[in-house]
Image (cartoon, rainbow, N blue to C red):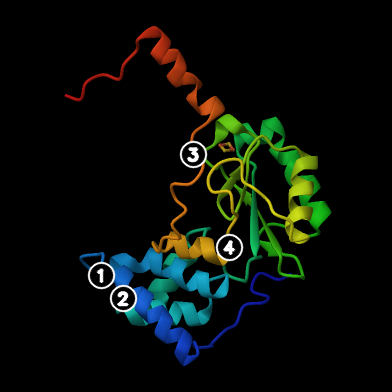
């Protein structure tokens, strides 16, 4: 699939969508002293509508924030979390950074990509799954780690990764290792990243197992963080 395949160029939002997006955008913009500071969350907001940052999304952000479209595109194409063509309902990231790679992340990526039949930032024809090579999920103590719509799936193997994606494509219930029990869609996750809560942020464990080992050792030895000067 070419890089821009599936992307709609030059479209504008239908009036009812535009009205809804404007309502959300105004709430987000109101949180910042200057409107342009709201660009990153607004890009997530339009991504929550389209599954990527569409041409209409770029236009919308520019208009709402008093920026040129070139300024908006310059930002959205800089960050890898903003997608340039539609991602799957489940966006699956495989960490291939150093620790995960040596613990099996490279093998997971190779086998999973071949199993699903798509490469980096590509989506399956049924629109269910897209894959991304990720550079560290900040969860190295659970390497090799994968994420689905930014929820953690720890200590993966090539077989567990393939099973996970098969389950997602079959519509089976899938539970992240940490965080909420229910896995949201990529669009729903983008809305949360825009700053519009789904009420699930406090659900499930965030730190567990290996992450807490250092804390246990510190407690056993009576170690404390130095006082702030
Ligand atoms: S190297 Fe994979 S989470 Fe850090």
Residue 161 lies left or right of residue 89; in this view the side is right
SS category of the residue bearing label 4: helix
Residue wearing tag 1: 30
Residue wearing tag 4: 186
Estimate the spatial distance between the alpha carbons at disc 4 and disc 3, rounded to whole Å. 20 Å
Label disc, if present, on residue 149 of the rendered structure = none
Residue 114 lies left or right of residue 80; in this view the side is right
Q: Quadrant of ligand 1?
A: top right
Q: Position of residue 120 (x, y in %)?
A: 68, 57
Residue wearing tag 3: 206
Q: Is the residue 152 above or below the residue 172 in the image?
A: above
Q: Position of residue 31 (x, y in %)?
A: 26, 65
Residue 196 lies left or right of residue 99; in this view the side is left
Q: Are marks 3 and 2 in contact (CB under 8 Å)?
A: no
Between marks 3 and 1 in the image, the one whose residue lies nearer the viewer: 3
The structure residue drawn at horizontal position 51% and vertical position 70%, both measured from the top left corner, is 47
Quadrant of the frame with the N terminus: bottom right
SS category of the residue bearing label 1: loop
Quick one: 99 or 205, which is closer to the camera? 205
Residue wearing tag 2: 26
Mark 1 surroundings within 10 Å by alpha-carbon count, few (fewer than 14), some (14 through 19), many (20 or more)? few
Estimate the spatial distance between the alpha carbons at disc 3 and disc 2, rounded to whole Å. 31 Å
Q: Residue furthest left?
A: 229
The structure residue drawn at horizontal position 49% and vertical position 34%, both measured from the top left corner, is 207
Quadrant of the frame with the C terminus: top left
SS category of the residue bearing label 3: loop
Residue 118 in sight here: no
The structure residue drawn at horizontal position 79% and vertical position 47%, both measured from the top left corner, is 163
Residue 111 in sight here: yes
Q: Are marks 2 and 1 in contact (CB under 8 Å)?
A: yes
Mark 4 surroundings within 10 Å by alpha-carbon count, few (fewer than 14), some (14 through 19), many (20 or more)? many
The disc, 2 or 4, on the residue closer to the chain's N-terminal end is 2
């Amino acid at each position: 699939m070419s890089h821009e395949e599936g992307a709609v160029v030059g479209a504008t939002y239908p009036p009812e969508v535009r009205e809804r997006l404007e309502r959300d955008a105004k709430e987000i913009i109101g949180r910042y002293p200057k409107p342009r500071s709201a660009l990153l969350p607004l890009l997530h907001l339009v991504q929550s509508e389209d599954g990527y940052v569409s041409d209409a999304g770029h236009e919308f952000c520019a208009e709402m924030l008093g920026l040129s479209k070139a300024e908006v595109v310059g930002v959205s194409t800089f960050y890898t979390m903003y997608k340039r063509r539609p991602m799957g309902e489940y966006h699956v990231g495989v960490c291939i950074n150093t620790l995960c790679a040596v613990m099996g992340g490279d093998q997971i990526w190779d086998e999973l990509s071949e199993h699903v039949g798509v490469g980096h930032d590509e989506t399956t024809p049924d629109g269910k799954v897209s894959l991304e090579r990720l550079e560290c999920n900040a969860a190295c103590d659970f390497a090799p780690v994968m994420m689905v719509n930014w929820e953690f799936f720890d200590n993966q193997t090539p077989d567990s990764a393939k099973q996970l994606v098969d389950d997602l494509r079959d519509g089976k219930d899938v539970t992240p290792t940490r965080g909420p029990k229910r896995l949201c869609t990529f669009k729903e996750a983008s809305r949360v990243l825009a700053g519009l809560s789904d009420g699930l942020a406090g659900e499930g464990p965030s730190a567990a197992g290996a992450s807490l080992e250092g804390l246990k050792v510190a407690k056993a030895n009576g170690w404390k963080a130095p006082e702030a000067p």
